[in-house]
Image: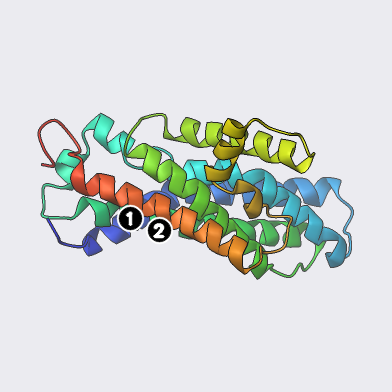
Amino acid sequence: MSRFPLRYLPWMLRDLLLSQGLVLLTIGVLGALILSRITPAPLPSDAAPMVLGAVRQMSWPFILFCVASIVSADRLQGYYRTTFVRPVNPSAYYLSRFLLGGLMVGLLAPVMTAAMAIAVGPIPLSWSMIARLEMLYLLLGGAVFLASTLTRADWLFAILVFIVQSVLHGLSQNHVVLPAFWNFIAMILPPFHLTSLDQPMPPGPQLAHVLLYGLGFVLAALAVLRWRPLGSGGRS
């Protein structure tokens, strides 16, 4: 089972466009209509923070929407039995689906920028925002991807990890002295605080921390897919 799922890629992309893509387009259209009616046209320099605010609010829910149950749904509903009836590598298949989800998340910033530009006038597209979105997708989406290979509550697991990390980081930033156990937990949890969309790109060591952590999630998910059967009847 070593064949790469090239023939499956157009179908995976089609499914994403017909679900997440339509949702994203609908949000963009509705946002443009609402803003055009309730917002006086500001200068482009004044509209850029509006785009950032909209993308920041949508980023986490949309990432979860793009990657939640990526493996667990197929296992629960038995789709893997037909998907892998051909000699297709499950790790390569789900990696392809994960990467296409990242492509869809990257469209969030251009769509919201275009929606607000329709309402208030030309707004420059922030490539830095797209890069930070993809960085967040790698870390958060990677955590969901790994959890999805192990449990049905993958998105819930990611949210709980994010909440714990955010609380511990916030306490640390406020100079609250934590017990040694919680300091250790804070140290090993994913660095979600480095993926904030309203902050500049982190410097080299911190950026490497985020990227290596996210890649670690993805590689661990691929390892689970490689060694753990998808169902009781084998990989089919």
Q: Is residue 182 left or right of residue 98?
A: right
Location of residue 3 by image quarter:
bottom left
Which residue is at the front of the view, 175 or 76?
A: 175
Q: Quadrant of the C terminus?
A: top left
Q: Position of residue 209 (x, y in %)?
A: 54, 58
Task: Please say whether residue 193 is visible from this viewpoint.
Answer: yes
Q: Position of residue 232 (x, y in %)?
A: 13, 30
The residue shown at (15%, 42%) is 82
Furthest residue in direction front, as rendered: 180
CB within 8 Å, label 1 to label 2 = yes
Residue linked to disc 1: 95
Indicate which disc residue 201 carries. none
Against 163, residue 111 (above or below) is below
Q: Amino acid at mark 2?
A: Leu
Residue linked to disc 2: 99
Which residue is at the front of the view, 76 or 162?
A: 162
Q: Is residue 53 left or right of residue 214?
A: right
Q: Amino acid at mark 1?
A: Leu
The residue shown at (21%, 33%) is 78
Q: Secondary structure at mark 2?
A: helix
Q: Secondary structure at mark 1?
A: helix
Which residue is at the front of the view, 159 or 213?
A: 213
Disc 1 packing (10 Å; few <14; some 14–19; many ≥20) = some
From mark 1 to mark 2, how far is it between C-alphas?
A: 6 Å
The residue shown at (73%, 36%) is 171
Q: Position of residue 66 (x, y in %)?
A: 46, 46
Location of residue 1 by image quarter:
bottom left
Disc 2 packing (10 Å; few <14; some 14–19; many ≥20) = some
The residue shown at (41%, 49%) is 217
Q: Position of residue 139 (x, y in %)?
A: 51, 51
